[in-house]
Amino acid sequence: MSHDPGPAFRALHRPGTPFILANAWDIGSAKMLAGLGAEAIATSSAAHAFTLGQPDATVTRDQALAHAADLVAATPLPVSGDFENGFADAPEDVAETVRLAAEAGLAGISIEDTVPADLSAYAFDLAVERIRAAAAAARALPRDFVLVARADGVMTGAYDIDEALKRIRAFDAAGADCLYVPLPKTRDDLAAVCKATDKPVNALAAGPYTAMSRADFAAIGVARISLGSALARVTHRAIHDAARAMFGKGDFSPLSHSISGADIDRLLS
């Protein structure tokens, strides 16, 4: 590709000055988020699955790549891929996912240390080797590419914060560009994640962390705030609540809270 989104994307990652990585789920949501001020877009594996009528962790690599290419084409913003476990167990196959993601035009991707089938964690040595292979593939690309290594075990219950800190330090040494521990149990734990590395740290604005402001994340040292599937689930909540009112009570009043079609058209254009 002639355009390299990597440098602009990398430049957004400044510890203590976090940008919001806006997770979109289709072309329309990507365009709206861009029109409303997003500096970068990300896919969301769960939100993408929702659009296909599938549960999370059931989208294939080919589906994720095609979806990512659609979002890359939708706006001029850098796009990062939420690529689960790299759609593979073996390090060499995760490396291939990195190469394919770059070909799709992505500015970077996130790789988890979780086995999708049962949410167990990869053994420590294998988890590190997977990130080392992904980092080597990223550095061998003809353009910049931001690799995020995720330690998801705290969120899934597979391990505790001490193991998460051990893993992100190892992922850092293996060549990851950004580190990510989704939903640590406390703010102090999130602060410990930021202190465990000199590299940028991503935080997830979901669950109890929606009570934090951008300034709160900045004070801890976070460099990037992603939304995961939270914004998509907000839209699904609107569908859920309006449908319950309509089909249960014959009440159409929730529809009065909608944005105007003209405003949507303006953002999409």
Image (cartoon, grey):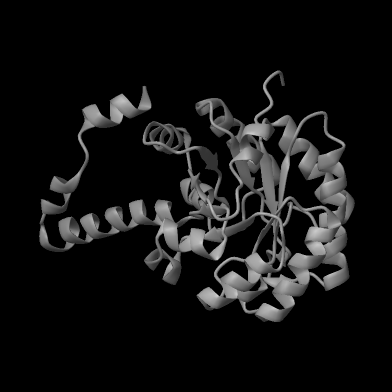
Q: Is residue 135 left or right of residue 241?
A: right
Corner quadrant of residue 97: top right
Q: Please state the total of marks drawn on the protein image.
A: 0
Residue 155 seen by the camera: no
Q: Is residue 161 left or right of residue 188?
A: right
Question: Residue 156: image x %, image y %?
Answer: 61, 74
Residue 33 seen by the camera: yes
Corner quadrant of residue 244: bottom left
Q: Nearer the viewer, residue 88 or 91?
A: 91
Q: Nearer the viewer, residue 180 or 97?
A: 180
Does 67 appear above or below 210? above
Does 169 appear above or below 49? below
Question: Residue 130: image x %, image y %?
Answer: 84, 57
Question: Residue 13: image x %, image y %?
Answer: 61, 46
The C terminus lies in which quarter of the figure? top left
Give the residue displayed 40% in from the left and 64% down from the top: 210
Give the residue displayed 73% in from the left and 38% down from the top: 145
Q: Nearer the viewer, residue 115 or 11?
A: 11
Q: Is residue 66 left or right of residue 49?
A: right
Q: Is residue 11 left or right of residue 257?
A: right
Question: Residue 213: image x %, image y %?
Answer: 40, 60
The N terminus lies in which quarter of the figure? top right
Does 170 appear above or below 7? below
